Image (tube, helix red, strand yellow):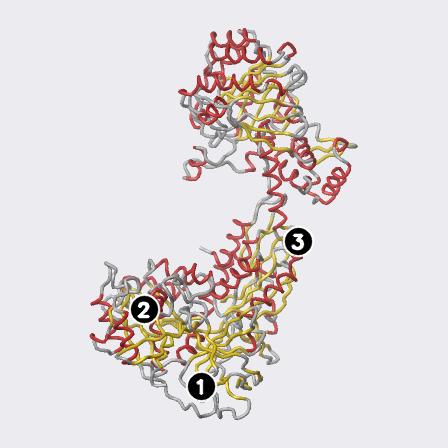
Amino acid sequence: MKHIRNFCIIAHIDHGKSTLADRLLQVTGTVSERDLKEQTLDDMDIERERGITIKSHAIQMDYKLNGEQYVLNLIDTPGHVDFSYEVSRAIAACEGALLLVDATQGIEAQTISNLYLAMEHDHVIIPVLNKMDLPSAMPEEVKDQMVELLGCERDEIISASGKTGEGVDALLAAIIDRIPAPKGDPNAPLQALIFDSVFNPFRGVIAYFRIMNGTLREKDLVKFYYTNKKYISEEIGVLRMKPEKKKEISAGNVGYIISGIKQAKEIKVGDTLTHFEKPCSEAIDGFENVKPMVFAGIFPVETDDFEELRDAMDKLQLNDASLTFEPESSAALGFGFRCGFLGMLHMEIVQERLEREFDMTVITTVPNVSYFATTTDQQRLVVNNPSDFPDPSRLESVEEPFINAQIITKSDYVGSVMNLCIEKRGALKNQVYLTSDRVEMSFEMPLAEIVFDFYDRLKSISKGYASFDYHPIGYHVSNLVKMDILLNGDQVDALSALIHKDNAFHLGKKICLKLKELIPRQQFEIAIQAGIGAKIVARETVKALRKDVTAKCYGGDISRKRKLLEKQKKGKKKMKQIGNVEIPQQAFLAVLKLD
Amino acid sequence: MAGIYIHIPFCKQACTYCDFHFSTNQKLRKPVIDALCLEIEMRQSEINEAPSTLYFGGGSPSILDSQQLNQIFRSLSNAFDLSALEEVTLESNPDDHTEEKLNLWKSLGINRLSIGIQSFIDRDLSLMNRAHNAKDAELCVQKAREAGFEKVTIDLIYGIPNQSEEEWKSNIQRAIDLNPEHISAYCLTVEEKTALYHQMEKGEISEKDDEVIEQEYLTLQCMLSESGYVHYEISNFGKPEHLATHNANYWKGLAYIGFGPSAHSFDGANKRSWNISNNAQYIKAVNSGGQFLDEEILRPEDRSNEQIMTGLRRSTGFDLDQFPKEHALMVQQNINAMDDQLKACIWQNESHVGIHPEKWLLADAVIREIMIDS
């Protein structure tokens, strides 16, 4: 056990985590030159294309230092705030962390919040300055930030470049020297932390664990602490470039288990794996049932494709346990699913995977967060869908989730960031200058506000120089109303949204204007109205179609013209019909794209 | 009954709205005409009846000099029996109406001029970058008459930005006063990749509202019918004995053969083809015996949809009896399923279906509903 080191890497998106990880794999001979491709650890196409890590990965490396052979377990974690629970479990599985900072960028909000997580777990932190090969690197300035943040010595910071390989040997030595070997009793009852799982179509679910105490052997009868289900450990092993079977794995080590589990949702990240007979006396701290933060409807474009969509969603859920869904029906869109996501990125990923892996084109409705509504007869209802919102006459109060938002930006942009957050109903809680040029601001704000175009606007007002992270801080009572959209008097349920009362007039006007832009003229006038209860707060009109013809049609262009009309006819069929009004698909997300 | 179309892809200057194939560079004029004559020779076997119409379009065919026009006519008469020609049309620009050219055209047997007047207002003409001015517009018809042309058609454009309702009315009135046998009036259409499109994108010019355009269209219909013109196709009006034959044959689905870059042909049954719309590539392909046209074989449903499309733009409508039975049934189902507002645009008279002329501006919306699924 004293030759094992378990560590993770904390880094902001684009700070070069995956490239540095590739370099570690190469130097330790874990991956051959031939098999090395960019972002070796990221399996999914979508991860490589977007340069992000969605799932946690683990890899075991061998490294010889001063004549002693060491086993190094790297646990690669997702970087995005949507997956912060997964990150916290991966951190809990390690004794140390590399804090990787881009020498051209400096410390970002994401880095800080994950760093605090690592510090809570008493991790040894190894500060690493990456991308030192770039001419725009500003090592002295970024070192100042790191010293300030960590209270470390300047000479503890390792300068590295994932690209050139600079500093990689020094880094490996530091991992062995500074990070303590794991502690634990191999003879105690088994206690292993599940930090992620993946789905394999042939083997079922493969769970990744870190053993805290005890020893796991092949063919052991095991159970999970929280789900209390029992399984046989059909295969166990360690994760090299390819899984490597083992007869037993002991305290301190990281490995995988295959036990005939068919669905990802049977395994919960953060759960404790133990023996069925002689179980450990307590579970590992920190388990949470992951709760979706953002909800939206997903509907097939063609109403007939509902069963196909169900099939695709079931398959997606096999390897994405954090995706939840239940059937929903909408007067406007027919049958579909109300889905819960960890955040906006997760929602985008699910939508993209549906299109990419299952060839399903879907309509996603305006996302919302989860509310609590208290009715006059003192019932407390969970509202995940605007259509479940109680009628104003029997509504006593509504609570909405709030977050603590941390934003790090250049001092030049403090004013604009402040304005944006205040517009988004935020309240400034703290403001700290990290250096003379970098400011960290904390706001308390409703989660719902960051669902609507917050991130894009933050990026644009700060010219990209702002990073953002958030943590839920519970529910507060808010003055919320349900705004409905009516087309020629017919309510379009899929366009309803829960919004703050003070924004109703302003937002109603904007949505109506946007819809006016998106809904094509038809043979009759279309009234677009935004209403709260019976009160109309905004109205726009799409005038009746007066002209729909190409006046020129010479002999030549008969084929082209026919094809154009046939194509338009097909396009029309894809539109959704509400009453007698035809609505293009993109209108259902119009609320997200307000200027 | 067949028609011949000759495309002359050259212009003095580029009108801002035009997206037809043309070039303002005259360097390739001679080689294009040589290749065009070669194409006539190569494809003469495609028509085995004496053509009844011949049409020079463009571009600006009136730009051609005597030698070039003579060369084309020689090739045509070598390849085809021209004795049955009834209608020989040449598109001309008012600024090309010199006595010399008019006499030349007359002597070659051209018996109908299609004059691109577009407007009688200088501001409109320069906005569209036309080569002529208001004075040319006023005089060109009279000059044609003096040279002996008995059949004249003039083009007008409506929906011109910045033109007032009064100005449009006066344009129509001046056209009527010139007493042409036929008038074509097109709505200014903003096509991508034209100068006009870019001007609109930049906000230099703004498009007229649909409501205004509809009003201009209704005014046009009203004034021309009061003056004895028959509105027989969405953009075409003629004195009863002078409806255009060549163009009408396109819409009726009769055979035509087109020569020159970008010219289209139809065999009258199920084959359409179109030449390369690039002068240099056309020359090269024709001279080297290479492929200068693309073709498409129409399926029965394509033909039915063509008939719906062209029929609904004409006063006669389309005739369901001309359709395969199952197509006629589908069309009738589509008509029955239309919403009331659109249904009010059409008339149905035994087997014929058409759009009321005052609703022609909604033709595409109606056509999309009636077309059968392809």
Res. A409 image quadrant = bottom left
Q: Which mark is residue A27?
A: 2
Say whether disc 1 or disc 2 marks the residue closer to the N-terminus.
2
User: What SS does tag 1 mark?
Assistant: loop
Cα distance, mark 3 to mark 2?
A: 65 Å
Depth check, mark 3 against mark 1: the one in front is: 1
Residue under label 1, please give it. Answer: A285
Residue type at the position of mark 2: Val
> Disc 2: which chain?
A
Residues marked 1 and 2 touching at CB (< 8 Å): no
> Disc 3: which chain?
A
Cα distance, mark 3 to mark 1?
A: 54 Å
Pick the quarter of the image with the N terminus of chain B.
top right
3 and 2 marks on the same chain:
yes
Residues marked 3 and 2 touching at CB (< 8 Å): no
Residue under label 3, please give it. Answer: A579
- A133 vs A112, left or right, is left
